[in-house]
Amino acid sequence: MSNQGTRQPAGTLKISKKVIAAIARTAAMEIGGVASLPEFDVSMGERIFSRGFGIGPVRVLLSEDFAEIGISLNVESGARIPDV
């Protein structure tokens, strides 16, 4: 029997939440209308009870099939939020 035409997964790849957060932070800063990302003082309780990696403005929650990324932004004065 031949396996021609069917593809089998070659392996797995795991990317850390910190790397995903760094990429998301960089991508957010490249969007027109974004002034900066806020600096947060995260309480100890929030660190303990957080669902995902989230110290600062970027939060990453990984599941088996997807990544949920939340980003807090400071928008430039006069920028339209729906456009950002």
Image (cartoon, grey):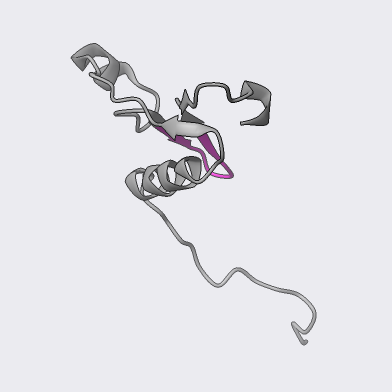
Seen in the picture, residue 60 relative to 51 is either above or below; the reply is below
Q: Position of residue 20 (x, y in %)?
A: 42, 47
The quadrant the C terminus occupies is top right
Q: Nearer the viewer, residue 64 or 21?
A: 21
**Residue drawn at the location 51% of the way across and 39% of the way down:** 63
Asked if 30 appears above or below 58 in the picture, the reply is: below
Seen at 77% across and 87% down, the residue is 2
In the image, the segment drawn in magenta is: 59-69
Q: How many numbered dots are placed on residues in this image? A: 0
Residue 33: quarter of image: top right
Q: Residue at x 74, y 82 (%)?
A: 3
Question: Which residue is most to the left?
Answer: 44
Q: Is residue 48 left or right of residue 51?
A: left
Q: Position of residue 27 (x, y in %)?
A: 49, 46
| In-front residue for pair 60/81 | 81
Relative side of 70 to 1, left or right: left
**Residue 51 at x, y percent in the picture:** 40, 24
